[in-house]
Image (spheres, rainbow, N blue to C red):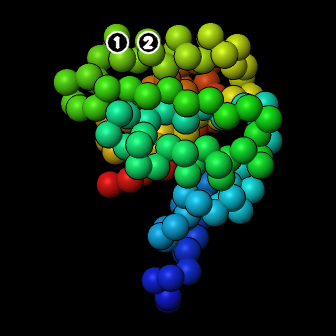
Amino acid sequence: MQNSTQPQRVDIDLGDRSYPIWVGSSLLQTASTFAQLPRASAAMVVTNDTVAPLYAQLLVASLEPHFAKVHTVVLPDGESHKDWQTLNLIFDALLERQCDRKTVLFALGGGVVGDMTGFAAASYMRGVPFVQVPTT
């Protein structure tokens, strides 16, 4: 990495499944970070009750210029909550808000949030786009 103050892009080359990874600080509050995402009808930010007070509003504010609707679902924190009951909180939120196949899920948090959101994204309506926004 050349300059630690400038975000760096790392491209993962997987043919038609290629994707970029952005590494840097202050990416959450920069709306242009999310400008190149596929166009979608809505975004759903999935986070936990530890991360939400720190970063959820920053991410929501950065997503609002790019999505007509931005929803948030807050899960309980901790490995002990990696279960079907917690997973259903995500599915319930998606269904209650009438999210369709063009909804992008954003996992804002650490490993448990990423695992739960990734599984939900792969399962909901035979799969919806998924963006990992790690905080650890």
Tag 1: residue type?
A: Trp
**Residue for badge 1:** 84
Within 10 Å of disc 2 (Cα), the crowding (few <14, some 14-19, many 20+) is: few
User: In the picture provided, is 70 more to the left or to the right than 116?
Assistant: right
- Between 127 and 116, the one lying in front of the other is 116
- Between 82 and 76, the one lying in front of the other is 76
- Picture quarter with the C terminus: bottom left
Mark 1 falls on what kind of element? helix
Mark 2 falls on what kind of element? helix
Q: Residue at x 59, y 60 (%)?
A: 29
Corner quadrant of residue 82: top left
Residue 93 visible in image: yes
Question: Residue 68: where, in percent of width, then height?
Answer: 80, 35
Specify the farthest residue to the bottom.
2
Q: Which of the labelled discs sits on residue 88, or is there none?
A: 2
- Between 31 and 124, the one lying in front of the other is 31
